Amino acid sequence: MGAYQGTGDLLKGGRNATIGGAPVAHSTTAGAYYYQRGVLIAPTEAGADLLAVLDRRGIDRERRAIEDLERFGLTEIRYRSRRKDHETDRLVEELGGTIPVEPGYILFPATHIGGFAARRPTPAPLRAIPNQPRRGRGKGVNIGVVDLGFFDPNEAGHPRWAADGVMLDATIPLPDPAVTHYPFVGHGNAIVGILKQLAPQAAVYTSTIESRPGDAPGGTSDRFLAAAISRLLCTHRIHILVIPFGGATRLGAMPITERALEPHLESTLVIASAGNDGIDPTVYPAVDPGVVGVGAWKPAATRLGWLKKACDSVLSPATAVGTYQFAPWSNQGIASQLGAAGVAVPAPFVTAQLDVMAGTQDPPGNATLDFEGWGMFTGTSFAAPVAAGCIAGVVGGDMCPTPEALRSAAIR
């Protein structure tokens, strides 16, 4: 089973959906967020108080497991409840004012509340495929990407330049023509391919987010994302980190991911997708003060001058007033400090006929599509690497880019 081929229905806590072995639930008490039912996260120093509450509620030691996440100063408590309602949600709401406790939040690829990817990939017409990347850009810049899976670009027949300087930590099988795929098929490879078009001399390092058999397709947890980020940033010197995932929360922060990023925010520019819900929710990590969230402009990438002029439209919403508008499904407000091309962005894909489910902006039903090596990808997931690749092109050169240069290039 590939990283994007899971089981269960993600929408609104559908039956049989799990992440990391815990059932997926949707908040019914406050906000619109997904979480792992039966999973609680608390600061290590508050763990004893939380356990005392569970004792009083009759959730005894035989029905719970405790794991100290020492790297992050947090404790994860998993418990089996005899009740089938949203007990985790209610516990968090009741205790939030006295004990700092959060559920195990769940994230999806650049969609946070109401659906999947903005649009499934479509075959790329010849006129949209660049003959070569933007030469000489991104030299000396290390870009990190976290995602659920990356297939081998050489095995997929990607252009040579799309694989040069790409260090994959792990690979998954190529998309199987014999199965029906979710609309985020090829998600990780498209992000890497976009980066290599805009900053071909940059080094790209990937970190594959852990997934377990039976996990809901395309979803991950706060803990799994944090582990992938920490592993990447503690192994390599990363100048720009791309996070094409997001999740809504109660308080605007995912506690484990927040602590994984915190030590690196002064030296690493973190770029996250804003989400595809067409609203201005509290979305993490895009809304974090130390992270640059990126929304998608309405025009297709080719209308914005792909590939040569793509970076001219990587702008803050204030600068772009009167020139560009966000796509109606792109989150805006504090989640989108930047806008970039995110509609029909070309990227190397596969040569195959694939059956693909509908995304949130597609007509209902599956579509059988013939891909000839390239695809067109739509969503704020793909606006994020456009912004990152353009920033890498600005700061790249003979010298290692400084944090000050990265921040200056990010917000125009």
Image: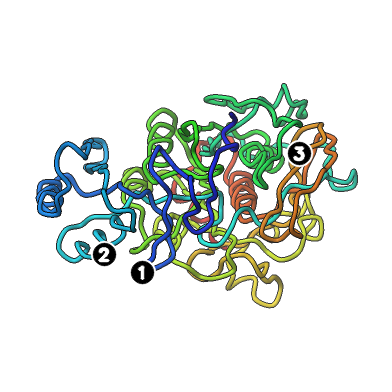
| CA distance for labels 3 and 1 | 46 Å
Q: Find the residue positioned furthest to the bottom.
A: 322
Residue 342 appears at what percent x and percent y?
68, 56
| CA distance for labels 1 and 2 | 8 Å
Residue 282 appears at what percent x and percent y?
43, 65
Secondary-structure class at tag 3: loop
Residue, disc 3? 133
Q: Nearer the viewer, residue 267 or 229?
A: 229
| CA distance for labels 3 and 2 | 50 Å
Front tag of 3 and 1:
1
Secondary-structure class at tag 2: helix
| Mark 3 Cα-neighbour bin, 10 Å: few <14, some 14–19, many ≥20 | many
Amino acid at dot 3: Pro
Say which residue appears at 66% left-offset and 70% top-offset: 328
Say which residue appears at 22% left-offset and 49% top-offset: 42
Q: Nearer the viewer, residue 192 or 391?
A: 192
Residue, disc 2? 93
Residue, disc 1? 30
Say which residue appears at 48% left-offset and 46% top-offset: 17
Q: Nearer the viewer, residue 395 or 349?
A: 349
| Residue 199 visible in image | no
Amino acid at dot 1: Ala
Q: First in sequence: mark 1 or mark 2? A: 1
Residue 380 appears at what percent x and percent y?
61, 56
